[in-house]
Amino acid sequence: MDTKVKQKLDDFFKQYKYQKFEKGKILVRADANPKGIFYLTEGVVRRYSISQLGKELTLNIYRPISFFPMDFAINKTSSSHFYEAMSDVEVFRAPKKQLLEFFKENNDVMFDLISRIYKGLEGYMMRMEYLMAGNAQARLITEFLIYARRFGQLKGSKIIVNLKVTEKDLASQSGMTRETVSREIQKLKQLGIIDFKKNKLKFNKLEKLEQMLFGI
């Protein structure tokens, strides 16, 4: 994010209410009108829905610096998803009306928001493609690549994801059972492509994952 844009966002949101949420707490409930728009400065938040069978499906993961739920702000609709703290989080909460006025007055901030939306859509499209047509391995690799691109940090020749990831999380995101996810993880570990210990994810050969997915 451009430093000037970030400074503008900081200056705007820090006029309003500051809140802390512990891991596991719900920030926004489905079908509820949020009391404002959250600006995430610390921690990680996931957005998810619950199917008619009671199964959770993770739709997005937010890290600093993010603001949500923007569908409520822009489209004037109540949120149809839950927003849950995946770690202890810190946020500021601004009124919707004032936030929209702020966007209208700051084109650079609005452009940054649009850019974020399109980057997010790339991940959605990739996930949709392999959810509809891919096998179990392809679906899991898709989730791994999304994690690597969004949360990965290069350390030597490896990429480390600085976020706790569980098999349950991966199952929720890929639409598979936890048992299937576990089997596919073991296959990739045996190939030396990834390490997955104590909910920490490390990619030893990210390019190999891309080759397996895209057939390069």
Image (cartoon, helix red, strand yellow):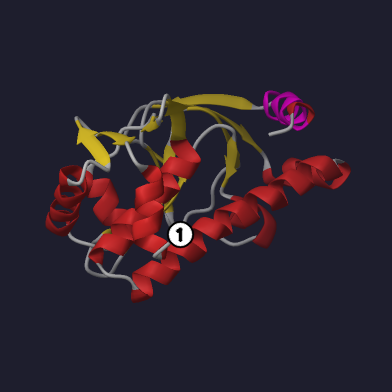
Magenta stretch encompasses residue 13: yes
Instruction: Name, please, the residue furthest toward the right.
Output: 105
Question: Which element carries disc 1, helix, strand or loop?
Answer: loop
Residue shown at 26% from the left, 61% from the top = 137
Q: Is residue 61 left or right of residue 22?
A: right
**Residue 136 picture location, percent across and down:** 24, 64
Secondary structure character of the magenta stretch overall: helix
Tell me which amino acid carries mark 1. Answer: Asp
Which of the 4 image quadrants contains residue 12? top right
Residue 187 placement (x, y as % from top left): 16, 51
Q: Is residue 130 visible?
A: yes
Q: Could you tell me residue 22's position as x and y percent? A: 36, 27
- In screen coordinates, is 94 left or right of 172? right
Residue at the image point whose x is 12% and y is 56% from the top: 179
Residue wearing tag 1: 31
Q: Magenta residues?
A: 5-15
